[in-house]
Image (tube, helix red, strand yellow):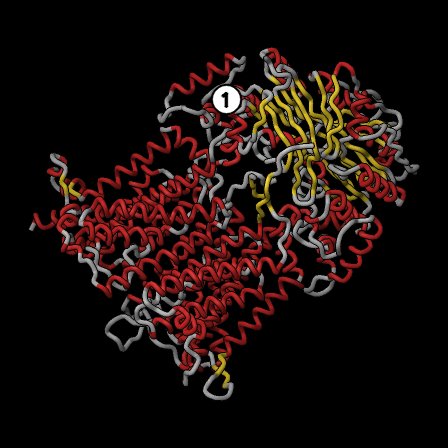
Amino acid sequence: MELDKLGVVTSFVHNIVVYNIPLLYGTVGEIVVEKSGSLNLGVEGIMAVGAIFGYICGCYANSLGVGIAVAFLAGALCGLLFAALTVSLQANQNITGLTLTTFGLGVYFFVGNGLKAKGWPVMGDYANIKAGFSDLPIPVLSDIPLIGQGLFSHNLLVYLGIFIAFVMWWYLNRTTPGLKLRAVGENPGAADSVGINVKRMKYLHICLGCGIMGIGGYYMGLNMSGSFNSSCWINGYGWIAVALVIFANWNPAFAIIGTFVFGFFNTLRVSGSSLAAAFPGVLGWLAAVPTQLYQALPFLITAIVLVASSVRNKQGSGLPASLGLNYFREER
Amino acid sequence: MAQEYAIELKGITKTFGSVVANNNIDLNVRPGEILALLGENGSGKTTLMNMLSGIYKPDRGQIFVDGKEVTIDSPEDSKRLGIGMVHQHFKLVDVFSAADNIWMGREKSGMLLKKERYAEIEEMAKKFGFDIDPKKKVYNMAVSEKQTLEIIKVLYYGAKVIILDEPTAVLTVQEINKLFQILRRMKEEGHSIIIITHKLNEVMEISDRVAILRKGEYITTVNTSQTNEQALTEWMVGHKVDLNIQRAPMYKTRPLLEVRDVTIRSDEGAVAIDNVSFYIRGGEILGVAGIAGCGQKELCEAIAGLRPIEKGEMIHKGENIVGLPPRAILEKGISMSFIPEDRLGMGLAPSMSITDNMILKKYANSRGPFVDRKTGRKDAEQVIRDLGVVTPSTETPVRRLSGGNVQKVLLGREIKAGPNVIITAYPVRGLDINSSYAIYNILNDQKQDGVGILFVGEDLDVMIDLCDKILVLCHGKVMGVVHAHKTTKEELGLMMTGALDLTHKYEDKPAGFARDSRFCTENRKEEA
Amino acid sequence: MKFHIVKRDNCPLWKKCCLYLAAVVIALLLGGALLIALGVDPVAYYTRMFTMGTIGNKIAYKVWINYLKELVPLALVSVALSLAFRMRFWNIGGEGQFILGAIAAAFVAFKTGAGLPNALTLILMCLAAMLTAGIYGLFVAALKVKFGTNETLMTLMLNYVALYVLMFLGETKADWNFFLDAGSARPVFASFTELASFPGIPMGGKFSLNICVILTLVIGILVFVYLKYTKQGYEIAVVGDSAGTARYAGMKVNRIVLRTVFLSAALIGLAAAFKVGTAGILSTSITDDVGWTGIIVAWLSQLNTGVIFVVSALICVLHYGSTVAAATFSQVDSSFANMLQGVILFLVLAADFYTRFKIVPVKKGGK
């Protein structure tokens, strides 16, 4: 009986990580995009496009690596579209982002439904994908009782996600290209005047960020074991990622923490009742909390963070000063 | 063989829509000289320099650097050619440190952002003779610090040609002297310097040669040592500065608007207007002279009720108007027209029609929920006819009009409202001579109708000829009020720079007031 | 020969129309190529889509009724959003405002019961929806005015909060929850009584024109008049054009922002009342994404009230027609419409560039 309770806790911790890492991909990707000064509201659509192409190509090649690469490329292509419209053609970023969401979800269902009619690749049939997506426990650390299995025994993509978050944090804060990127997002006019190629920086980082989002989408598809039905794999995670960017104050390292905070609520929604059953005395009340509250909490918290940071002094915020504004050099 | 010119421009033309900003301009700079680029506002100086810095691309013309023809497509190209520009509105990232603002433009700077960059930048700055704190964030810097940083930045990138766009506009006298020392030293080190300005004394002091632009046209280039301010002014404005503005006779009447001991703060919280007192009579034009940014904007906004007044009183027809909302002040007949640098920022709605702009201040007066455009259209037609506004129709958006016509529309509306006090700032900014005269005539007509006018101006020649009295501001303080027909440009200039303070000239009178201010004192007693 | 890009002062109307038309045509050609690849005759598909299957259809009147049901909320929401956008207040909270309006209207529909006459119930529903949505909008506007909170991100977040409130109501079986059908064991929304649904006006034959259509048209005209001829509309234009000028002219800018955002959100609430009042039932997908599509419609119409009606009518044809066409051509998924819509918009966005900028050659050589 005692052991079972421990098992509930361990699987709870495990689930927080496993089911919410896609958020981290989406968030880190969006941070990279926003740091270049572009507000991209198309995360949901981009993740969907990355997911569907990544999944299908990954399965046909029977290789997780191909899946990841294709998901990245598909996301990056969406980014290229976004960049071409907003950077080169000066289109409104909000409208372009929203359109990208409509378009991306359209592509997702069009390709998915089309393939389903012809023969859907079932993930279980592809040994390499299955094996690649299975848990790889970290020696020693995963033996820690209670949390070891929960925190340190995960699939490759979990490690990759956290690795990317740290690399992006390092890239933004500790490298020269990162410094240049931040300059572009803060004041493109100043960046331009010292000879930074603003257009190239924006194109590159929009594509890079969107590619990272694409991998996150692919992860979500794998998590669902590739079962394709009427609701999209991404299921609103793209929008949570947009919120998480604000919550993480545009810092990829904070995004890891943010992912786990949001993931905590997300997981309570799914396994709150099992926690309540395991610890009726302490956590029994969890069963009574409506699941929708957990779903709304990320957005509610972000809204509060947003208000709080606007009330406070602006200087400490990671919000890029020219976010959402297009740059046209000859503007008078 | 050393080339004669570091930079040579030939036949440069640049248009913005229908506006010709630069027409067929030739210009050259020798290595190791300071060239002043002189011209009035709107003469195309900044546009021309922006083509060297890669912000704009010329429509036509050739650029030579060290004798070789080049194409400058971007600031990147410009930097590579050794051209650096310090823009009037600084191009700095506020949340970055001084060092990072420089570092971000460095080429081949390696992947890693090392701590050593602070020491390197500091050392480099020392080498050029500057003392900076490389870790200080730009948002904590004073204006002069930001300018120094900009100069260090272009030097660090190895600029041989340095362009400064109105660098002295925001500086104090001491800071200007320091800047000039730096420029002279850079010249000795072999740099070519182009300094954009419209201040003649600075031109005479610092430059080796002067190139003059007027209304987008190249006029001439002369050696500074072989010319004088009079000659330069003639080139700059196009004919001898015998302005010949007919100053309408003035009748002494009671003060209409009296400002007593007023203190106003700027947006940044600094004291912009410091304990200032003056008054305007009906039927007189009171000029306000001062170096740009000496509190003129804040003063105008405060009178119009757009800016809180920290201390003091403003008496209009015997009633204190401090604290009244803008609309109430408007209804009392005090009209303010402030023409900012972009002309359309305050006073006009640029994408709306002339008619719609005519009704801006009185739309609320008509009965019922609807806007009365019929009267607006009539007013628009009348203003267009009376002031000779060139426009396709009354329904043309104001932003499509040329600068002079925009200003005529603005002033025309103010006058139509029948004010008793007109506050007008820089009404002829960027206008050609004919348009300017049209504006002066409008103001003189108003004056003769008994309206009190506060004229915030830039051109001292104009102010001496147009105004009855001139109030001089220096860093928010009144340096004195003088009779326009008795003063000289030199006296005004000294007062503007703070070198001459007339406020204590007459001990028996309120500080700094012209002779007839006793009139005012008597009035006060009557009121009391 | 080198080229560079310069801003245009203005672009003649015919040129704009040609550019946009070209964008749509190219998008349709691209879609057509995809259809051919799938083995579908694009002409037949597009014909079916754009006529929404009304030709040679005995029950065409039903198509029109359903089409108008989709059009009314979209047009009204777009008109409402254009009010806020005119002041450069980027309200992307249409979804959330719509949901709250729908809940408020449903609340009235369930609570007033049979005691009240039909018209009064409907009016109460509309008022409740407008007030609720309006206050919600006002809240965001107040934050913006007071603290400078970014309204785009704020309304985006609140959209989801509203959505989960609605889902909570729709998925929680409880005694207090009168929104649900008491007769069903599973949580499903209850239907309204006949009294709480908007009547149709018979137009001969079996087609009846719902009163909401007429009301929407009337509101459209009212908003047009409001913006163009009233003092408040004039204030909105000035504030949107130059806030500095507005302040200088003695306008209370903050008050105007608050008032206009309230009005904008209230009209979205009204659209929601129309929607639930014709559907006769709540649903978790009650918005049908009008909050999002409305933003795109308002922007495409360049905030022009008349054009909004045209654009939203066309977008609805695209949506509705593709469902009809999908039923006939089973090889083509109904999501084809979303893709096509995306491509059309991308190309229109690109075309828009040429209306704002022009590309001119750089001439070499001086005198």
Total numbered badges shown on the rendered structure: 1
Instruction: Measuring from the top left, give residue C194's x and y in whole percent.
Output: 41, 82
Q: Quadrant of residue A205?
A: top left
Q: Amino acid at mark 1?
A: Tyr
User: Residue at horizontal 84%, vertical 37%?
Assistant: B285
Instruction: Measuring from the top left, give residue B1's x and y in whole percent.
Output: 59, 12
Position of residue B255 in the picture relative to residue A313 (left or right): right
List the single residue furthest toward the bottom. C205
User: Residue at horizontal 26%, vertical 39%?
Assistant: A162
Q: Which residue is mark 1?
A: B157
Whether C302 is drawn above or below B159: the answer is below
Q: Quadrant of the C terminus of chain A?
A: top right
Q: Chain of mark 1?
A: B
Kind of element beneath mark 1: loop
User: Residue at horizontal 28%, vertical 68%?
Assistant: C174
Say which of C64 and C251 sits in front.
C64
Say which of C366 and B463 sits in front.
C366
Say which of B82 and A5 sits in front.
B82
Whether A264 is drawn above or below C54: the answer is above
Position of residue A315 in the picture relative to residue B67 (left or right): left
